Amino acid sequence: MTIWIDISTLKHRLKLMDDNKLIKAYPIAVGKILTPTPSGTYTIINKQLNPPAPFGVLWMGLSKPHYGIHGTNNPASIGKNRSHGCIRMFNHDVLELSSRATIGTKVFIHN
């Protein structure tokens, strides 16, 4: 079993994968035009429960400094290009994702 995350910035969709099998897809918000979400392959390097605002209930830091997958205090932003480059999720979704995606999980971000 190899858990990994596939993020499409164009589709505003994060997919939790087990090898080539889809476990679950989630709606997300991504970076604005001036602060786009970076494409590439990264790793989840840390997790923080109840981080400072505006990161919602959970922060999962990526191996690209200053970027992460996190909850939001602005659920209306999900499905849009609203962040400073991070991947925003509904708070209940990021908690569910975090229970399956451990530190070391690969994250592939693309258009």
Image (cartoon, rainbow, N blue to C red):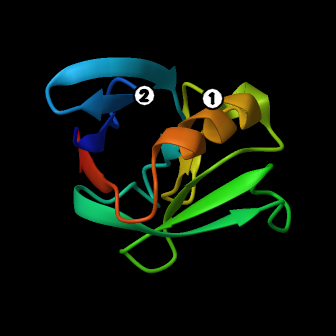
The label shown at residue 12 is: 2
For the N terminus, the image quarter is: top left
Q: Does residue 80 sit above or below 68 in this rendering?
A: above
Q: Secondary structure at mark 2?
A: loop
Label pair 2/1, CB-CB below 8 angstroms: yes
Residue 77 in the image: state x and y as whole percent: 68, 32
Binning the other alpha carbons within 10 Å of mark 2 as few (below 14), some (14 to 19) or many (20 upward) gives: some
Residue 14 in the image: state x and y as whole percent: 40, 32
* Residue at point 75%, 44% (across, down): 72
* Residue at point 37%, 74% (across, down): 63
The residue at which mark 1 appears reads as 78
Residue 43 in the image: state x and y as whole percent: 33, 65
Of the pair 27 and 79, the residue shown nearer to us: 27
* Left or right: residue 55 compared with residue 73: left
* Left or right: residue 77 compared with residue 8: right
Query: Sequence-wise, which precedes: disc 2 or disc 1?
Result: 2
Q: Secondary structure at mark 1?
A: loop
Of the pair 3 and 29, the residue shown nearer to us: 3
Q: Amino acid at mark 1?
A: Ile
Residue 31 in the image: state x and y as whole percent: 48, 50
Residue that sits furthest to the bottom in the current view: 65
For the C terminus, the image quarter is: top left
* Left or right: residue 24 compared with residue 83: left
Q: Does residue 53 sit above or below 15 in this rendering?
A: below
Binning the other alpha carbons within 10 Å of mark 1 as few (below 14), some (14 to 19) or many (20 upward) gives: many
Of the pair 32 and 60, the residue shown nearer to us: 60
Q: CA distance from mark 2 to mark 1?
A: 8 Å
Q: Amino acid at mark 2?
A: His
Q: Does residue 89 sit above or below 15 in this rendering?
A: below
* Residue at point 43%, 28% (across, down): 12
